[in-house]
Amino acid sequence: MDPIRNPFAPGAGQRPPELAGRERELKAFEVVLERVSRGRPERSLVLTGLRGVGKTVLLGELRSMAIRHGWGAGKIEARPDAELRRPLSAALHRAIRDLAVRHRAPDRVEEVLGVLKAFALRANKADAKLRDRWQPGIDAPAAQGRADSGDIEIDLVELFSDVAELAADVGTGVTLLIDEMQDLQPDDVSALCAACHELSQSGAPLVVVGAGLPHVPAVLSASKSYSERLFRYARIDRLDREDADLAVMAPIEREDAGIEPEALDALFDASGGYPYFIQAYGKAAWDAAPADPITVKDVQVAAPEAEAELAVGFFGSRYERATPAEREYLLAMAELTQGRDEAAGTADVAVYLGRKPSSLSPARDSLMKKGLVYSAERGQIAFTVPHFGHYLLGRD
């Protein structure tokens, strides 16, 4: 069929496959927005799950929902070894601009922007030369004595409080969305928890929505023992058969085309219900189909192309980041699990490789830092990428 009309191409369609089956999360966030707007307390939200389940796309939809409700919204992506202060400043700057169009007191907006600028400028090192100092691009004079102590925990509490008060002025709220939350530095995680705790105590209308790998709750709990009271965790998983079929049929039907039931069976078997894979196999099947409807033969013909694309863009790009020692560890995990999406015992990996567990700790810790594996529970290790073990066993 016409590749130009392909509804599975990136950015195509009004509702991407990653959002099929996420009605519960969308409705729950709708309730959060309504409750907070009415001054009622509500916990912040953290989405957890493997790669390829659509957390980032869902996070983007939640941001759009907040904006449609008149909220200020800013989004950041945490990165390993990068401090939170600078990207957070840019995200809240965007949120304040959203609020400014509704606020009737420009001086009040400028006052909060001044606090934000003071917070942002502390991202510069004290000994940095003038030419190397980062300027946040905030059109307001920096405040003095507010959110500028240099202690991220103190500063974040003060900044969140001021931004939330600005939102309360116009009867709305602010949403800060943080993707790849597991990559936040320990001090930043602690500061974020402290700020959320302060907001929950005061009922201020600012909500943090995070997304990250399955071990994010453990990261937050290790930082602050009370973190489980601050966040509501939502596990985002693969789609069940009904929702997976919807993710395939809905975009096809929008193009006035069809797909045979046997082809749906084949697509589900190939994708395992993971939205990212549904999109990859669906796109390839559409391009391979010479006519409407898409048949099981079309899916079979398209499968090698989809698998080749995944091998390069989804699996291969991550595998290439691993060192030889790390690749050895990954392959041992794949062998022990026989390519299934299951956890392997860290002691079993050591036995398989004929090594002492302590000698493998550097490779395991580095793989966790790179986001390739996570600790499912004590003594267990699993891939963050679905079907990664199968991919490793299939390499030449």
Image (tube, helix red, strand yellow):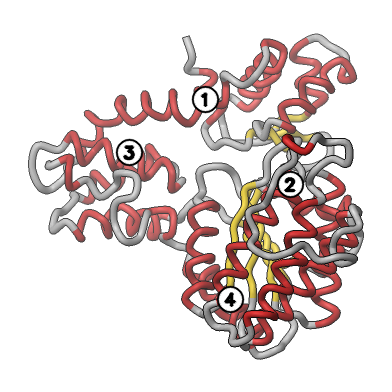
SS class, disc 2: loop
What residue type is disc 2 on?
His
Q: Position of residue 297 (x, y in %)?
A: 18, 34
Which corner quadrant of the image does residue 173 belong to?
bottom right
Image coordinates of residue 264 in percent, x first then y, are 28, 48
Q: Which residue is mark 1?
A: 317
Q: CA distance from mark 4 to mark 1?
A: 39 Å
Q: Secondary structure at mark 1?
A: helix
Which disc, if any, is residue 263?
none
State left or right for residue 333 relative to residue 301.
right
Rendered image: mark on residue 215: 2
Image quarter of residue 256 = bottom left
Q: Residue 393: horizontal and vertical position, in percent? A: 53, 18
The amino acid marked with disc number 3 is Tyr
The CA distance from mark 1 to mark 3 is: 19 Å
Secondary structure of the residue carrying numbered label 3: helix
Q: Is residue 180 left or right of residue 51?
A: right
**Residue type at the position of mark 4:** Leu
Task: Tell me which numbered mark, 4 or 1, is placed earlier along the sequence.
Answer: 4
What quarter of the picture does the N terminus occupy?
A: top left
Q: Which residue is tagged 3?
A: 281
Mark 4 or mark 2, earlier in chain: 4
> Could you say which disc has been placed on residue 99 in the image?
4
Residue at x 90%, y 19% (from the top left corner): 358
